[in-house]
Amino acid sequence: MNYGPLIFLAAFFALAGSWSGFVLTPQLQIGRLQQTNTIGNPTAAYPVARPGLAQQGLDVYRANGCAYCHSQQVGQTGTVLEIALTDAGTNHPPIIAALLKLAAAPADGPTVLTALPQLEAARTNGGSAMLLDGLPKAFLRSSSREGANAAIKALYAAGAKAQLWIVPVGPDLARGWGSRRTVAEDFLFDAPVMPGSQRVGPDLANMGTRQPNVNLHLLHLYAPQLQMKGSTMPPYRFLFERRKIGLEPSPEALVLPAEVAPPAGYEVVPKPPARALAAYLASLRADAPLFNAPLTVPASATPATSTNAATTAASAK
Amino acid sequence: MNPNHPKSPFIIHNSSFNLPPSVAPDVIDASCRLPLVVLFLSAAVWLLTASAFGLIASIKFHAPGFLADSAWLTYGRVRPAGVNAMLYGFCLQAGLGVALWMLARLGRTTLAAPWMVIVGALCWNLGVAAGVVGILGGGSTGFENLEMPAYAAALVFLGYLMMAFWGVLTFHQRRERQLYVSQWFLFAALFWFPWIYSTANLVLQGFGARGMAQAVIAWWYSDNLLVVWLALVGLAAIFYFVPKLLNRELHSRYLALMAFWMLILFASWGGIPASAPVPAWMPTLSVVTTVLGVITVIAVFVNVFRTTGGKCLMRMSNPSLKFIGAGLASFVVVGFASAVTALPAVNQVTQFTWFTIGKGLLNFYGFFAMVIFGAIYYIVPQLMGQEFPFPKLVRAHFFTAALGVLLFAVPLAVGGIAQGLKLQHAVIFADIAKGTLPFLRASTVGDLMMALGHVMFLVNLGGLVFQFYRGRALSAWAEATAEIKTAEARP
């Protein structure tokens, strides 16, 4: 290594390698992603571009560096299979008995989600109508496909109809931050992409699902400590205008509690960037069931009857 | 490889008969003087600016309402402004200064076109200033470590090209054909940055990439800058100064060669977090190469350890060696921490926590800045031909810097692990966030200590430069006035 050109070539090929790996290939692979269809709804394309105001809100999110405190990536540690009863017919006692029998199965069998005393009570004093109310409802959880199939067979023999639900699990999901892991498709139409690297504040991947109300977002941006005592989120008052009430109060003025309210005769009105940011936050929903991140949305939530067939097909993979 | 050893490349032995004779060190230093003064002084000013931004950001965790009503000083703008001031204002700028000096000294030749380097440095500083103001004004690009808006990035790129081109020319016109290990690292670093910087800016701000491809490219850029570039320059300085100041030979040229190859071949593939929502082969590849990075760290450590004969650099009397020793220690810690936290099971805990931030800042302030401080404390007195005006402040700077780094990296690391462990359970998030506050507030003390050290650094550096140019001006004045007197006395 005594020649300049040799060092140059070494460095050139090393960097060219990593460049083609992590610049060129992602462009070819992720850069060519197209909209995909969601499970159970073959006509619904995912993702769809955000509405105009939310698109502007992405810009406010970028300019004020929201991504330094909020990630938009939900993780998932795995999936479990849940067995849901869709139809319990009219003869309940055998179904309850079958559920109890499955609950008593060896350790590798499915676990029962409903409390055992409740099941026992349903068997003895016939409270099964209440227990089997509001179907479809998940009763069993299984970690293996075989166990789940056996359970479904047993329930079928007892006169019930059951189906498999795929349920992603993990601490993030248990905290209510989403219903499945985040995938590359979720960011398809965002520029710039800000997945975030820190959780000083909560993850926002599904903020719109958790809080669809734009007005509450505005209130939170104006005075974060109102909704979350002791929060370290800074207030974003520069996105709002405090002004004298004109002829009549503005319909857009924030409804503020006494401790942060402006003096009498004044009102706090969100400026356009604040409205855009709130619209963006409300548009954050990364919960569509996809083939590379499957989950079952209970049939009551989706009107299409094909949902169940599709999810069962996906779970078989 | 001892600079003073008879067979060392540092000693003139013109094996190639057609080579022009080497240039004396003081002539080389004179050619480097003004460009390096510009680079080091502006780097020191940026360092202090970054500390000020860092402190503002840190105080916001004590009082979220602090300076919150100004859009320009909201947390999400102050923090990237501080990081960019530190990275582009200090790390790259001071690193380039040290690199140019090492290239000139190792090549036994004067710095090529010092004036062009000064123009480049001014262009660079203009770009960084425009970038930092742009970020504060809301013009950030949204990509971490690459926040500077396009107009600033263009200036920064131009400034770099102007400095690096003359660096390459200095390397080319070297009078000493035998290459020392540091030269490999520096030569690779010189052209590593323009490639990654132009790629990242053109793709992310120019042509545009779709979806998560943007994030992958941003991660690739960050890794190549923060892990590869900083290590290339930092290790070049370690391999140059440790043998030189100890008056010993570098233990093994081949071990250094291995570290060089490992760094450029593997470290350049790191950076994609194990949990990233991208096709699985990308994080997998990054995990493997990051874990392999341990080999680089061990190779460097063993090489330096054998060079010093097992003595601790931080306990040497030479302040430059103290700083470089602390830098090497941080390099080892960061390397091992990166390898361990790259493993998916550990990454599950440390991702999204303050641990990652603490590790990143340890790389900046613990490794790179420390090594560069050590180098500057050696180089600048050589350039000026005189000692620092406040030698005690150099020692004080070492203690505040070392203590500051400890006080700030340890709480963030411990707090980050605690935060990550809690994130593994479905605990209410607000409680987790509150649990990190004591650690964050403790780290503010470290911020303060480091800021104090940076003031000492600037005072000493500025003092020496002032002293030197004042001396020059005075002697020039004396000469000028003396001449007039003799002219008057003649008739």
Image (cartoon, rainbow, N blue to C red):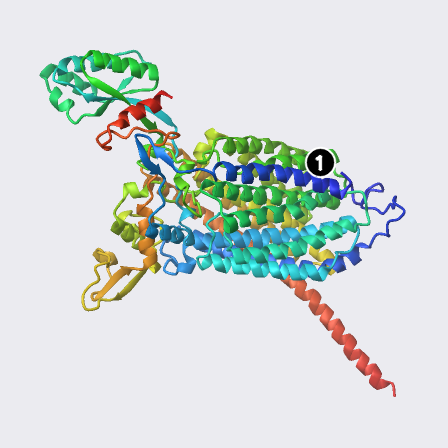
Residue A248: quarter of image:
bottom left
The part of the image, by quadrant, that contains residue A180 is top left
Foreground residue, A180 or B431?
A180
Task: Determine the secondary structure under disc 1.
Answer: helix
Residue at left offset 77%, top offset 56%: B110
Question: Where, quadrant-wise, is the N terminus of chain B in this rendering?
Answer: top right
Q: The C terminus of chain B is located in which quarter?
A: bottom right
Q: Amino acid at mark 1?
A: Leu
B477 vs A110, nearest the viewer? A110
Extreme-bottom residue of the structure? B491
Q: Quadrant of residue B458?
A: bottom right
- In the current view of this chain or complex, which residue is farthest to the front? A43
Q: Chain of mark 1?
A: B
Image point (56%, 59%), residue name: B127
Q: Looking at the image, which is closer to me, A74 or B393?
A: A74
Is A271 drawn above or below residue A163 in the view shown?
below
Q: How many marks?
A: 1
Residue behind mark 1: B257
Label 1 neighbour load within 10 Å: few <14, some 14-19, many 20+: some
Q: Is residue A171 left or right of residue A31?
A: left
Q: Position of residue B287 (x, y in %)?
A: 53, 32
Task: Evaluate whether residue B252 shows in this view.
Answer: no
Return the residue nearer the eye: A294 or B96. Answer: A294
